[in-house]
Image (spheres, rainbow, N blue to C red):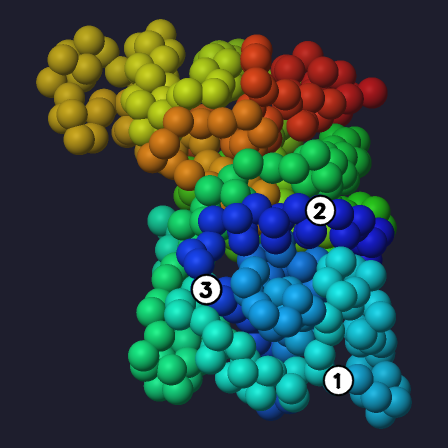
Amino acid sequence: MKYTIIPNTLFIKNRKKFMAQMLPKSIAVFNSNDVYPISADATMPFEQHRDIFYLSGADQEETILLLFPEALNKKHREILFVRETNAHIAVWEGEKLTKAKATEISGIETIYWLGDFDKVFFDLMTEANTIYFNTNEHYRQVVETQTREDRFIQKCKLQFPAHQYAKSNPILQEIRGVKEPEELSLMQTACNITEKGFKRLLSFVKPGVWEHEIEAELLHEFVRNRSKGFAYTPIIASGNNANVLHYIENNKECKSGDLILMDVAAEYANYSSDLTRTIPVSGKFTARQKEVYSAVLRVKNEATNMLVPGTIWAEYHKEVGKIMTSELLGLGLLDKADVQSEDAEWPAYKKYFMHGTSHHIGLNTHDYGALKTPMKANMVFTVEPGIYIPNEKMGIRLEDDVVIQEKGAPFNLMANIPIEIEEIESLMNG
């Protein structure tokens, strides 16, 4: 890991929140992710399962967390199982977690080697009635690969058919959505690294630069500031590429007079930031580009102020749609007849703004978090309206990450990242 060690008080708090909602005489188990193969002996870089990281801070493969608040032996109420290390592994793969280091990182006193899991787990299941399985119930999930968690669940159901089963996910959706101060600090660091990358670009971009060169500049700045790199696959879309919402080829030349939509951001300590800015290749916006850009910025600012405790996510999006409709009328992209005859299921504004405005962000870019209940303080949301006009070869999206406050407007984690037209032009031509 590149990041500075996180105080284990965060993970101790997170476990307490989870265990407080567990049923009597229940066990919860969380598995690390697999190391996924590419082909031959090649593998993808390891990414820890965000749930076990959230609850333990363990950022290593082949790790299992077990929580059993009512275990008869007090030392078995929290257990972390880690891969047994040795001198051979240290030479070939580098340092792995020792038992002492695992305790330091997690705050868990009882550390066992992974080889002890089956024996210890069987013994504890004789005391338990219910086991919590950690299934993925995120509203955007599309999982086709069998995970380490899936294999554990299958084995457990065969071995313990008389036990009751429960779901970890509803608890995690609730508690992960509301961030602790330590999490907000880590997210602010991710945003600060993103800021460094974006400001680096403003003097770099000019006609003739290629999208992948911009990607390289960002990656350089992110990694040199202790990030693993991009929090998600970067979108660097010049000209009409910006009208492909998930354009990730990043292989075109940036032409004079075009805009570049950049949906790019750094991670830090597994926490995501999520930024979008749209800038002129030539360093100056045209009059029409300024007109559309200003409309998107107004929508973003109004939408941001609506993110307060008590707001319902679905209703919020309807209200943002009304604001966007007004802006599109002002831009001449819609007329009153379009609005009067619109389909309630696909309003007229969706022709130019077809995606949502906000999602939870945290350990995942599209993070866990309650969506059907009122918003709460210390939830973190993106705000990312856009207007896409293929006929004008123009797509503009603007995005910041904001923290809901108990009172007043949200706190913008990206407040220091240039967004106003005048500031962007000044920095690009300075």
First of labels 3, 1 by sequence position: 3
Q: Nearer the viewer, residue 153 or 264?
A: 153
Residue type, mark 3 in image? Lys
Give the residue pinned by disc 3: 25
What is the CA distance from the residue labelled 2 to the residue labelled 3?
25 Å
Residue type, mark 2 in image? Leu
Q: Give the image quarter of residue 154.
A: bottom left
Q: Nearer the viewer, residue 93 or 11?
A: 11
Classify mark 2: residues with Cα within 10 Å, few (<14), some (14-19) or many (20+): some
Q: For the view shown, which residue lies furthest in the front direction?
A: 72
Place of residue 279 in the rendered image (x, y in percent of width and height, measured from the top left):
62, 28
> Mark 3, mark 1: which one is toward the viewer?
3
Which mark is drawn over residue 84?
Answer: 1
Report the quarter where the N terminus lies: bottom right
Q: Residue at x 58, y 88 (%)?
A: 119
Place of residue 261 in the rendered image (x, y in percent of width and height, measured from the top left):
55, 35
Q: Give the image quarter of residue 375.
A: top left
Query: Contact, CB < 8 Å: mark 3 with mark 1?
Result: no
Residue type, mark 1 in image? Glu
Classify mark 3: residues with Cα within 10 Å, few (<14), some (14-19) or many (20+): some
Place of residue 319 in the rendered image (x, y in percent of width and height, measured from the top left):
33, 17
For the image shown, how many numbered marks are present on the structure? 3
What is the CA distance from the residue labelled 1 to the residue labelled 2?
25 Å
Query: Contact, CB < 8 Å: mark 2 with mark 3?
Result: no
Q: Residue at x 66, y 46 (%)?
A: 13
First of labels 1, 2 by sequence position: 2
* Dot 1: element: loop
Which mark is drawn over residue 10?
Answer: 2
